[in-house]
Each structure stands twice: as C-alpha cells, then as structure tokens.
Image (spheres, grey):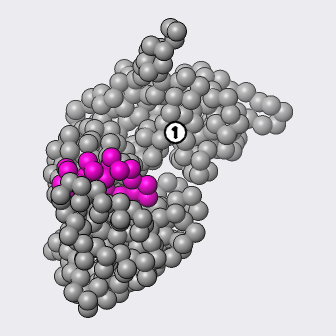
Amino acid sequence: MIDFKALSETYGTPLYVYDFDAMRVQFESLKEAFKGRKSILAYAVKANSNLSVIKHFAQLGSGADCVSIGEVRRALMVGIPKYRILLSGVGKSDDEIREAIKADILYINVESEAELSRVEMIARELNAKARISIRVNPNIDPKTHPYISTGLHDNKFGVEIVAAKRMYIQAKNSNHLDPVGIHFHIGSQLTELEPIYEAAAIVSDLLRSLQAINIELKFFDIGGGLGVRYNDEITIQPYDYAQAILSALKGLDITIICEPGRFLTANAGYFLTKVLYEKRNGAKRFVIVDGAMNDLIRPSLYKAYHRIEALGKEGDEGPADVVGPVCESGDFLAKNYPLPAMEHNDLLVVHSAGAYGFGMGSNYNTRGRSAEIAVDGENIRLIRRRETFEDVIALEREYLEG
Ligand SMILES: *Cc1c(COP(=O)(O)O)cnc(C)c1O
C-alpha cells in the first residue's frame, strides 16, 4: 500500500505518484501474451514521458514509440536501443525527419504521400536509406471517444489502403527508402476486440498483397490503444488481444510491434490534491481543491472519468463538483461525484492518472507544474521537482529590458 498521506506531507500537493511495480506488472503481462512470437513492445512515450518512467521501461526491455524528435531524444537518453525506437506522427518537420534518419532508429512511420516524398528527399541529401513503415487508415470505428479515435477516414491519421500500396511501390523503387514495416493505430482506450481484429485483418490482407509483388516487410505494427479500467469498463485481456492479432495474421511470420501507452501507465498513477474549501451555490455543491485542469486535463478535455478517493473519510454528503482554482468553468476533476463532507487540507486521491496526466499539463494561470514521485518497492524518490515561479517565467524574464 502506498502511504499517500505521508507522500503529500513530504512532497506537497498537487502531486503525481507512480507505482513502478504496477507498471512492471502491466509490461510483463503484455510481453507474456506475445510470448513465443517475435515481438517488440514499444512504449508509447507520450502517455507519460518522464525520463525515469521511460528508463524503467527501458530496463524491462521495452522499445519506444515516439511522436516527436524530443521523445526520441528522451528514449535514447535513458538507454532504449535505437533499433527499438520508432517515430510516428502526422506532421513531422524536416528537422525531425533528418535527425531520425541520422539517429538510425528502427523506422519512421509515414502518414502521407507528401511525407514519403519528404523523407525520400531528406534521405537523399544525407546519402542514406531511410527505413520506413506506412500508417494505414483502415477506416474502422474503434468505438471509443471521438477525440481519441484515429482509424477512421474522418480522422487525420494514416493513408487509405490504395494510397498505401502506391507508397510501398514508390518506396521499393527508391534508392533512399527501405520499406520495412506496416502500421495501424485505430484509437485509444479500446475496450472492444472486434475493431482491432478487423483492422488487423484488413492490414494483413494488404501485407499479403504486397508480398505478392515482392515487397517483403519485417514488422507488423499494431499500434497501441489497449483500454484500461477507469470506472467499470470491461477491458480486453492481453491474451485475447494477442490471439486476435495472431489470427488476423493467419500464420504469417513477421515481427509484431505493439505500442502500448495507457495500458502500461494509467492505473499505476495517482494524482494527489488537497481540499481548499467546500461551498454551495444554491443547491449545487463544490469541493475546491489545489489541483486543476492545468495538472490533469482529461476530465475537461474528454469528460474522462477518474475515480476519486477521499482519504480517511467516510460517509456521503451528496454529489459535488470537484473543481480547481483555474479561472475556467471547464476546470473540474469530476462532476456530481459523491463525496463525504470535506474540510480544509483533506486529501483526495485521483486514480488512474498515470497516462496523459502530467504530460498534458501546462502553466496556465501561472501555475507551476506539480512534482512527480516514483514508488519502486521500498524505494520512494522524486523524479521531477515541483516547478517554481522562477521556472515558469525563466524564458520570458530576459526580454523585459528594452
Ligand atoms: C498515442 C499512440 C499510441 C499509444 O496509445 P495508448 O492508447 O496510450 O495505448 C500508440 N501508437 C501511436 C501511433 C499513438 O499515436
């Protein structure tokens, strides 16, 4: 059991706390599901990009799925081997492409015909051969929140099957492109297997039709997206997930790359925030806390649900909106959430905050970002110090004169 009270006293609030054992358990469970198959788990760094978190996965043998060159640098810095690093993303800049080719990472996931030409041009300049994979948009409804759906033609991600085929032929005929993989990622927080299977089947058909024209790929990159339980969701079991992918591949011998983010970190993370005040506006109850949308934006952005535990408190004073100090009506951690009567300095533990929590944070309202703590067995350590006012203004202050 993590002693949240002690942590909040030592490190202050708001505070992110990550259970490294829980991350390890998730990683091992997925690895186990693909056992006996050539596979790489490439942690989707954007879910939680703290260097110590990435390093933790590096030590478990993880690769890294990155969506910016900054994330690639993070991954390399903590010891993820370059041959397990991917660069994805719909809008890579020339500089990012150049650096990725020079860094000799496993491959670049290409998301448009224009981008493919760009990668080819840059590789030619560098006199290199860029390893690429093409992100296919299989036009599958992943049955998740529209903001985290990515595999429909309505979404900006990937290219249609016919375009992908043209692109593989272009790549195959180029002296500066080496097509090695095929990629899809249909969305996040997936809780149904069927859309994943369908997407995998569509993409594996494309893989076979490429084989028929002598384009042999080495990597079948199934993206991430495995959902987790925030509330009462029935989630996909790693074993069933792996079996669905394998059955879509129908015996094809190819290395599977999986890019889990949320699955590895969400439920290993907690956001601690202290109660400042309680108040009522007419019949409406508000619990005002010191954490806000600049710390954890998922409730505001996606209406995401996070379980909230009022530490050491009992009873139910009725539903309350748990709101932060930020000057936005959209600044809330929960709406109509049943809570006991709360007093100044009571501690709330917001669960499932380990993915897309800290990383989506900002300095809005000139609020310094919170500290992050790792709990690794008996070992408790700071992995990012709290931002001070000086940190927040550091890049502006020098321009005041003149
Ligand atoms: C965001 C993302 C992931 C990880 O998604 P999760 O839902 O956190 O597992 C994997 N691959 C790509 C390409 C992504 O954009």
Residue at the limit of the structure toward the top, as seen here? 401
Would you say residue 86 sits in the magenta stretch? yes
In front: 127, or 159?
Answer: 127
Q: Quadrant of the N terminus?
A: top left
The answer to which quarter of the image holds residue 16 is top left
Give the magenta-colored segment's residue range.
84-105
In front: 69, or 327?
Answer: 69
Percent position (x, y) of residue 61? 17, 54
- Element type at mark 1: loop
In front: 325, or 174?
Answer: 174
Q: Which residue is under mark 1?
A: 296
Percent position (x, y) of residue 76? 20, 44
Residue 124 position (above or below residue 366): below
Mark 1, Cα crowd under 10 Å, few <14 / some 14-19 / many 20+, is many
Name the amino acid type tagged 1. Leu
Would you say residue 129 sits in the magenta stretch? no
The residue depicted at 24 percent of the width and 58 percent of the height is 123
The residue depicted at 24 percent of the width and 55 percent of the height is 125
- How many numbered tags mark residues here? 1
